[in-house]
């Protein structure tokens, strides 16, 4: 292993890798500590009001909170770290001798992309396997401790259970697992064959059945209609829906494993509750977002490898501005995917495509 590293990674490569990873880990650690301090001060009242133990806070809430923000911030912290130590190297006239010694700028980039590859692999693994698990810990803790004061239940919900069956619930009460003004319609092609209307429908979590209360049924066969009035009666039935179909929490899909998310996407394509775009965006983002480590590393090296007056202040200021710009573009991409007609995969790729072009332009202007 040592011989392999010595053959392909020269002294200058190891020097840059050490600076890169050291600055990245140190900067990321500072940001995480600051984020945790602010979060503790914000949610201290919730912890005290719900009598949360130190063990619950540490191993349930922050065990999910810290990995989530590390994964979220890592590309941007990586970007700032690259700019900081590269600008410092340029300011100390360390880059000029490297490029003057017949080393091409592309060869100079090798150790940067070795580190970016390591960050990409860790981030990809975390996005697919680790973060959904830790997010579930965090979201479960937040929901049980009422961090979000808004009512998470949906209203006016339409769901397609299968090819021919549609249901509608006007309002849902999650405390008693009851939906009000329930309508179930069965079609044969585009012809309505059966319509059931119930004043309410309640989920029995033990039997895993829905109980309809005070319902009426209309059967339609061409010009013939049959009306059955069961007002005041109850009836148990099995339906392919759960109370979770009527509740939505922030970041709920980020708490699903990739396998579970794909399974829900398949169901949602049939049911059409309006959550398909968000699910597709979340799934595609898990695979595309880690690529930002390469894009931002390229930009960071390109804008900070030239020695400028004023030291590292100007490159670092440009880097901070580009960080905020990247976040804004990323948020707009989410809006385009969820609220617009932009395909989820295209929307997820927008930030990396735009900044990739910026990186290519800056690379052409970088010192050679």
Image (spheres, rainbow, N blue to C red):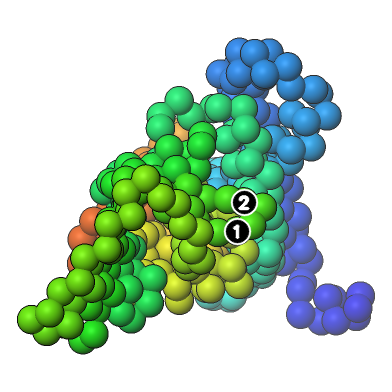
CB atoms at circles 2 and 1 under 8 Å apart?
Answer: yes
Q: Residue at x 32, y 73 (%)?
A: 165
Residue pointed to by mark 2 = 205
Q: Is residue 155 visible?
A: yes
Q: Secondary structure at mark 1?
A: loop
Question: With 116 as the anchor, is 214 left or right in this view?
Answer: left
Q: Residues within 10 Å of mark 1 (few under 14, many from 20)?
A: few
Q: Residue at x 60, y 41 (%)?
A: 139
Q: Position of residue 163 (x, y in %)?
A: 33, 81
Q: Position of residue 329 (x, y in %)?
A: 31, 52
Front residue of 308/113: it is: 113
Q: Is residue 115 visible?
A: no
Is 52 above or below relative to 68?
above
Question: With 241 as the anchor, is 146 left or right in this view?
Answer: right
Q: Residue at x 70, y 58 (%)?
A: 130
Question: With 329 as the anchor, is 287 left or right in this view?
Answer: right
Residue pointed to by mark 1 = 208
Front residue of 165/366: it is: 165
């Amino acid at each position: 292993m040592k011989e392999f590293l010595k053959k392909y990674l020269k002294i200058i490569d190891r020097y840059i890798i050490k600076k890169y990873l050291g600055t990245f880990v140190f900067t990321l650690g500072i940001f995480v500590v600051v984020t945790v301090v602010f979060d503790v001060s914000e949610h201290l009242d919730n912890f005290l009001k719900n009598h949360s133990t130190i063990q619950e806070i540490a191993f349930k809430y922050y065990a999910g909170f810290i990995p989530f923000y590390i994964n979220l911030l890592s590309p941007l912290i990586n970007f700032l770290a690259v700019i900081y130590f590269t600008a410092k190297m340029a300011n100390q006239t360390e880059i000029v001798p490297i490029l003057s010694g017949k080393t091409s700028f592309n060869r100079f980039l090798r150790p940067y992309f070795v580190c970016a590859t390591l960050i990409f692999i860790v981030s990809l693994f975390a996005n697919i396997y680790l973060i959904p698990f830790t997010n579930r810990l965090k979201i479960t803790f937040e929901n049980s401790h009422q961090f979000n004061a808004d009512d998470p239940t949906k209203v006016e919900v339409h769901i397609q259970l299968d090819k021919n069956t549609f249901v509608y619930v006007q309002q849902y009460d999650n405390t008693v697992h009851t939906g009000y003004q329930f309508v179930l319609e069965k079609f044969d092609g585009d012809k309505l064959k059966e319509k059931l209307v119930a004043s309410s429908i309640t989920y029995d979590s033990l039997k895993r059945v829905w109980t309809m209360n005070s319902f009426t049924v209309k059967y339609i066969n061409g010009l013939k209609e049959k009306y059955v009035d069961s007002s005041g009666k109850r009836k148990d039935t099995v339906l392919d829906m759960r109370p979770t179909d009527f509740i939505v929490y922030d970041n709920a899909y980020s708490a699903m494993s990739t396998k579970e998310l794909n399974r829900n996407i398949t169901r949602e394509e049939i049911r059409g509750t309006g959550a398909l775009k968000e699910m597709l965006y979340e799934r595609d983002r898990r695979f595309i977002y880690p690529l930002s480590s390469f894009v931002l590393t390229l930009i960071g090296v390109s804008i900070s490898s030239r020695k400028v007056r004023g030291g590292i202040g100007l490159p670092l200021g440009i880097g901070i501005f580009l960080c905020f710009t990247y976040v804004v573009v990323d948020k707009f991409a989410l809006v385009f995917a969820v609220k617009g007609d932009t395909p989820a995969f295209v929307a997820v790729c927008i930030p990396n495509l735009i900044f990739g072009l910026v990186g290519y332009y800056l690379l052409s202007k970088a010192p050679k």
